[in-house]
Image: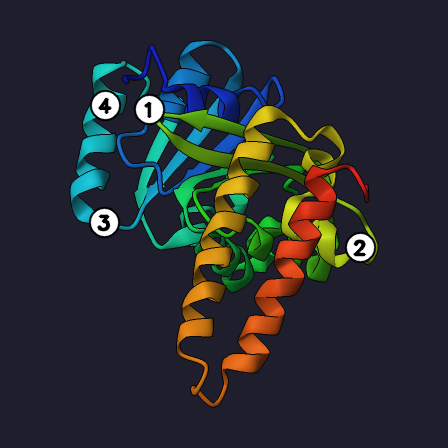
Amino acid sequence: MNAQQLSYRLGRVASHVPEGAIVADIGSDHAYLPCYLVAEGLAERAIAGEVVKGPFESAKKQVRQEGLEDRITVRLASGLAAIEPVDGVTAITIAGMGGPLIASILEQDKARLEGVQRLILQPNVHAKAIREWAAANGWHIVNEEILEENSKIYEIIVLEPAGKAVEFEEKELLFGPVLMAQRSDVFHTKWQREMSQWQKIVASMDANAEAADIGEKKQELAQKIKLVEEVLNGEIS
């Protein structure tokens, strides 16, 4: 992967960036995504934010090699602190982190989201945390994707300001309203894997039934397994 040829995962993230956007890529690593977006004319300008010194230096080097220093600013900062009001950022990408970490980054500096028209978020795990954050903060889900690359499954959640409170059912928080409606092959694969893991945990609980708090945890997992079975079988939508 490089700035000219993104991985499939990052390529799908890029596909959700509105044309002409001013993008902030948080946790940019080598800045491949912002370099690609600007070089291909998909974004007008970009900010590459990185909290770790090594990747920050790599990002600066990449931007310099691509000859994009006049259109991409690289900043050493934590989360949304990489964004300044003068930047006029209209879209933010955060990819390759856990869902709870992405949610905490958004929560920590919510004031810096003012004027942002789209969030393109790609959690590696626990996407539910992002949907919970969206509901609590007035962002609605305009699109979702689920994809598999190198035997790993990823989700992409695209959010836009709702201007009002947003409510999701518990099943929508867990599965994603768009993904649940589509029920793609990758969606089935992901939740079959999750259900299998939960079933193994329940079996191990049965073997250690003397634990004091095991009943409540077992009941919670049993409810999740039942919900997955219903969704995969098309019994609820």
Is residue 38 something that shows in the picture? yes
| Residue annotated with mark 2 | 166
Label 2–label 4 contact, CB within 8 A: no
Q: Residues within 10 Å of mark 1 (few under 14, many from 20)?
A: many
Label 1–label 4 contact, CB within 8 A: yes
At x 72% / y 53%, what residue is drawn?
171
| Residue annotated with mark 3 | 52
Taking 219 as reference, is 189 above or below it?
A: above
Q: Quadrant of the C terminus?
A: top right
Q: Give the amino acid at mark 1.
A: Tyr
Total marks shown come to 4
Task: Report, in whole angstroms, how far the alpha carbon at label 2 lies from the one at label 4.
Answer: 39 Å
| Residue annotated with mark 1 | 32
Task: Report, in whole angstroms, how far the alpha carbon at label 3 lies from the one at label 2.
Answer: 34 Å
Q: Earlier in the sequence, mark 2 or mark 4?
A: 4
Residue 116, given in percent of the width and then of the height, sits at 63, 41
| Residue annotated with mark 4 | 62
